Amino acid sequence: MADYDQKTDDSPWANRFHGGYAYLIPQIITGAPVCVSLQISASDEAKRPKYEEMISQNYNEWFAQTAKIIRSAGREQEFADVLQILDRGISVEFSRPGQAADIVFYIVPFKEMQQVCGTTAGGCYIRGNDMPAIYLPKNQLLMALLSAGRVNTRRIGVHEIGHSLGLSD
């Protein structure tokens, strides 16, 4: 897949792009699991199972919603090969200490996320020096209130997962 997503973006992390950096698409096509490293604070360690479930659900929701859009548009024949992959879903595994991962999810306080992603961002996908990463804010009551519940860590995660598949905004 061409390395095209958001190359002209002037966000604080735009200079971190490296041509040809791998997306997750090849392993998804083959059905290989995506291995995720989840980075959270020590104080949030009790929430790890909740975050792991959210990330797995986000990937599968992305696949299910995309299949639904294709079907509702009546374009099943045009996208028959893609629908096979979308309907199969995705296997997400979580790395343990010392195990390699394909992508890192950082769930951090909102202000920390803004330092990495920019002050207007709700989250971000970065293809950095080591491996692709998604930064998500911890659910914040203020964020939920100001957006009337439309913006939360789960919804931002689904959006950023699209970037990990090679799609731009």
Image (tube, helix red, strand yellow):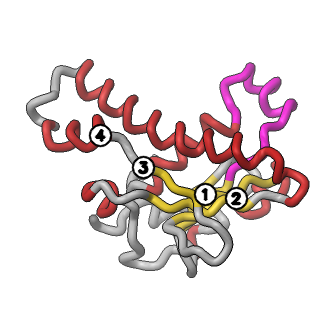
Contact (Cβ within 8 Å) of mark 3 with mark 1: no
**Quarter location, residue 54:** top right
**Residue bearing mark 4:** 88
Image mark for residue 134: 1
* Mark with earlier residue (2, 1): 2
Badge 1 density bin: few <14, some 14–19, many ≥20, Cα 10 Å: many
Q: In front of the other: label 3 or label 1? A: 3
Question: Is 69 located above or below residue 102 in the figure?
Answer: above
**Residue bearing mark 2:** 106
- Residue shown at 61%/63% (left/top)? 37
Type of amino acid under label 3 = Ser
- Residue shown at 57%/79% (left/top)? 130
**Residue bearing mark 3:** 91
Residue range (magenta)? 136-152
Any part of residue 114 in sight: no
Distance between the alpha carbons at the discs numbered 1 and 4 = 23 Å
Contact (Cβ within 8 Å) of mark 2 with mark 4: no
Q: Is residue 148 magenta?
A: yes
* Mark with earlier residue (2, 4): 4
Image check: 35 left or right of 41? left
Image mark for residue 75: none
Distance between the alpha carbons at the discs numbered 4 and 3 = 9 Å
Contact (Cβ within 8 Å) of mark 2 with mark 1: yes
| Residue positioned most to the left | 77
Type of amino acid under label 1 = Ile
Dot 3 lies on which element?
loop
Question: Is 68 located above or below residue 10 in the figure?
Answer: above
Image check: 164 left or right of 25? right
Dot 1 lies on which element?
strand
**Quarter location, residue 28:** bottom left
Distance between the alpha carbons at the discs numbered 2 and 4 = 27 Å
Badge 4 density bin: few <14, some 14–19, many ≥20, Cα 10 Å: some
